Image (spheres, rainbow, N blue to C red):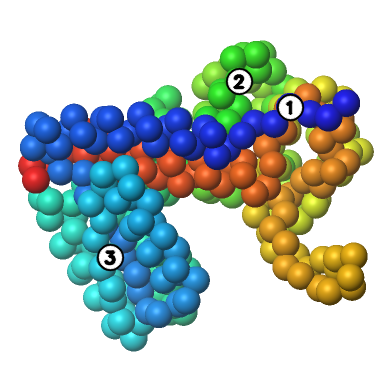
Amino acid sequence: MSANIIDGKQLSASIKEQLTAEIAQLKGRGIAVRLATILVGADAGSTVYAQSQAKTSAAIGIDHVLVHIDGSAGQAALETKIQELNSDPTVSGIMISMPLPKRYDAGRAQNLISPMKDVEGTGAANLGAIFQGDFTMAPCTAAAAYKCIHSQPALAVKGAEVVIVGRSTIVGKPLAMMLVQDHATVTVCHTATKDMIAHCRRADILVAAAGKANLITVEYVRPGAVVIDVGINRVNVTDASGAVKAKTVGDVDYDSVSNAASWITPVPGGVGPVTVAMLLNNTVQAAKKLKVKS
């Protein structure tokens, strides 16, 4: 029996629809909703992502500003620009397009962003807030996985056994604490975990966030479990004609696991679209707190 699909595109569209109405209300009160994206250097992938972010923001009414810094400018120039945006009364959210060029300290730069404008939620202050039960500015991908889990009323989190494969600062660790706040019993697995399959097969809810293509196969999944695939990986596959093509896959072997799970997020079309929506949501929440006048 195939698993039910948690449709990230549909969930994302619902979130954006709600945000569009909220933004219109804020603008009606003269409150600016403006996202500034800092792009350092000329990385092609980062540039395309920033342009896409601008288009997505504009579609729901968020003003977007792309702040470009020459790749050779140095850490001090980046930090100066961050401080300028922190002080800019017309900016409600700030994000840094990653990766930064070599010799830049991404962690230091991220932590310089005002916690109230840290819409990616990866600064120390907003990560720490999660431990106090405040998810307002949670990291976008962790928040997206959390949203997917809670999108189906039939999925009970309270008392559930949750296993998260991956302990990153922006997904595994914050998501674990968010679900603990919901009274789940959470286990975090990683590269040093012994007998990972045994841990995973205990899970009522299994979250794959390791960054390794097709890591989680059906052997890892207890029949009827909910599987949330956070991974986004590009792999080469050979089609029926023998041509080699690039394909986007998750950390979960979808074909096998979807026959064992009760609910599953696909890749693409699962957590990814919701991650984008949560960045927009964080920007709106920041605008509400700051009440910056346009």
Callout 1: SS: strand
Evaluate if marks 2 and 3 touch, with contact meaning CB atoms under 8 Å apart: no
Left or right: 251, with 219 as reference point? left
Q: Amino acid at mark 2?
A: Gln
Residue in front for this viewpoint, 284 or 96:
284
Q: CA distance from mark 2 to mark 1?
A: 10 Å
Q: Which residue is mark 1?
A: 4
Q: Which mark identifies residue 89?
A: none
- Measured as percent of width and height from the top left, residue 207 is found at 69, 37
Q: Quadrant of residue 184?
A: top right
Residue 92's place in the image compared with 27, above or below, is below
Evaluate if marks 2 and 1 touch, with contact meaning CB atoms under 8 Å apart: yes
Q: Which residue is mark 3?
A: 66
Residue ID at (60%, 20%):
152
Residue ID at (49%, 71%):
45
**Residue most extreme to the front:** 241
Q: Label 2 neighbourhood size at 10 Å, few (<14), some (14-19), many (20+)?
A: few
Residue in front for this viewpoint, 92 or 158:
92
- Measured as percent of width and height from the top left, residue 284 is found at 28, 38
Q: Which residue is mark 2?
A: 152
Single out the mark in the foreground, 2 or 1.
1
Q: Amino acid at mark 1?
A: Asn
